[in-house]
Image: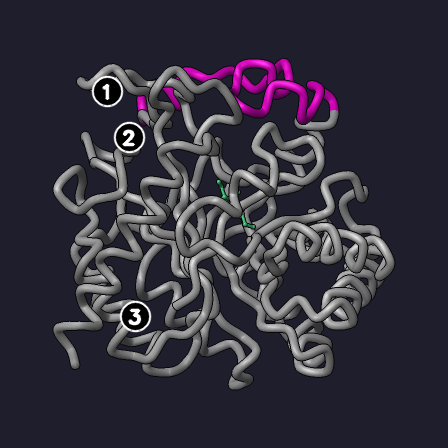
């Protein structure tokens, strides 16, 4: 296991030199944030990002993410062109020596919450999703009502997209995903890049849009789309926990034994009701994820990829990108490494 930390590039309030000071963190997860969705990533820019990270004494281990164009998810004829560009981006990662690509296949919205500063009992704040609040969000004016997505789409753009997805049911989305995997796996093999699909977050359909990578069975079905070892997942405990918290260690064993976990996001959540949860600090006692058993499963299946502490709470008066402050994620990184070290000692 290698501990990594997400960095949002030059605009991140948290500089690389601070990340370098977190014990055990030598690997960075990052991306190019200004390439329009669908366009091929220029190899020189990926290399410049890699060099910047290396100059700070770390390595660029994972690109998270290269967004997948909606036409691919919708199965439109133009998908051929977007998939070609995607393969060119994968090749650019390979040329820069980036070993892992984390990506997702969620229609329209990536991770979604109804509250970005939910108050926890200790005065810290965390991200939350509440089914009733989600049902009350009005998307007819675009994304202005949706926390974290305010400026993403105006009313016309969003209506057109939501309309296009009316014809895409779950099985159609699976077919479109299978087609895309068939296109990109050879490019990943040629580039020596591991593909790490991120599960849907939250793991259920939202705003009438289908979501398919929602639990252990879905991940097993996903893995079966290709026999290539380049084809795998990002094992994200926090995304999956609302549908299958108790099965997480078993899912990690199953996928880990097959060598298909290429990256892990470790985060804890507390389920508060049907399709409702809030995030908590990383240690097992705070939420529904048994982090020790998840890490044990990864260790016993010889996981030697990267783990990053996922969303932290906002603590100690820190302000910043929701879920991505320095302090609580740094505590998460040391907690996860402590558990790993203890498991390793007891297994020797
Ligand atoms: C949220 C992240 C996701 C993730 C993408 C991967 O904090 O875990 O946005 O980066 O879904 O493609």
Tell me the chief SS of the magenta region.
Answer: loop
Q: Residues under labels 2 and 1: Cα distance? A: 9 Å
State whether label 1 is within 8 Å of ligand 1: no
Label 3 element class: helix
Instruction: Report the residue that reaches farthest toward the bottom.
Output: 227
Residue 36 occupies quadrant: top right
Task: Tell me the residue that label 2 is attached to.
Answer: 278
Dot 3 or dot 1: first in sequence order is 1
Q: Is residue 220 visible?
A: yes
Quadrant into which the C terminus falls: bottom left
Decide which of 109, 348 is in the foreground and name it: 348
The residue labelled by disc 1 is 120
| Distance from Cα at disc 3 to Cα at disc 2 | 25 Å
Q: Residue at x 46, y 63 (%)?
A: 306
Q: Which residue is the site of mark 3? A: 298
Magenta span: 131-156
Q: Is residue 24 left or right of residue 154?
A: left
């Amino acid at each position: 296991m290698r501990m990594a930390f997400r960095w949002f590039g030059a605009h991140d309030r948290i500089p690389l030199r601070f990340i370098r000071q977190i014990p055990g963190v030598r690997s960075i997860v990052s991306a190019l944030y200004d390439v329009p969705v669908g366009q091929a990533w220029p190899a020189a820019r990926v290399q410049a990002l890699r060099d910047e990270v290396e100059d700070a004494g770390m390595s660029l281990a994972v690109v998270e993410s290269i967004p997948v164009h909606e036409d691919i998810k919708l199965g439109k004829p133009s998908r051929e062109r977007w998939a070609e560009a995607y393969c060119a981006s994968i090749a650019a990662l390979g040329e820069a020596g980036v070993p892992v690509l984390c990506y997702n296949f969620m229609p329209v919205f990536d991770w979604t919450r109804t509250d970005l500063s939910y108050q926890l009992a200790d005065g810290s704040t965390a991200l939350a999703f509440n089914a009733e609040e989600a049902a009350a969000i009005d998307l007819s004016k675009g994304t202005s009502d949706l926390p974290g997505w305010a400026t993403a789409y105006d009313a016309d753009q969003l209506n057109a997209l939501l309309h296009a997805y009316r014809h895409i049911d779950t099985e159609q989305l699976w077919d479109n995903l299978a087609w895309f995997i068939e296109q990109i796996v050879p490019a990943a093999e040629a580039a020596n890049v591991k593909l790490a699909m991120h599960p849907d977050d939250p793991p259920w359909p939202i705003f009438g849009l289908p979501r398919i990578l929602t639990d252990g069975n879905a991940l097993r079905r996903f893995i079966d789309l290709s026999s290539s070892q380049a084809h795998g997942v990002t094992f994200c405990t926090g995304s999956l926990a609302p549908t299958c918290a108790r099965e997480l260690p078993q899912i990690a064993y199953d996928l880990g034994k097959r060598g298909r976990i290429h990256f892990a996001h470790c985060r804890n959540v507390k389920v508060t009701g049907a399709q409702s949860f809030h995030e908590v600090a990383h240690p097992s006692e705070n939420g529904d994820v048994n982090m020790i058993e998840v890490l044990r499963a990864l260790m016993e299946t010889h996981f030697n990829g990267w783990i990053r502490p996922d969303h932290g709470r906002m603590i100690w008066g820190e302000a910043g990108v929701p879920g991505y402050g320095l302090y609580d994620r740094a505590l998460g990184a040391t907690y996860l490494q402590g558990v790993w070290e203890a498991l390793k000692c007891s297994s020797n």
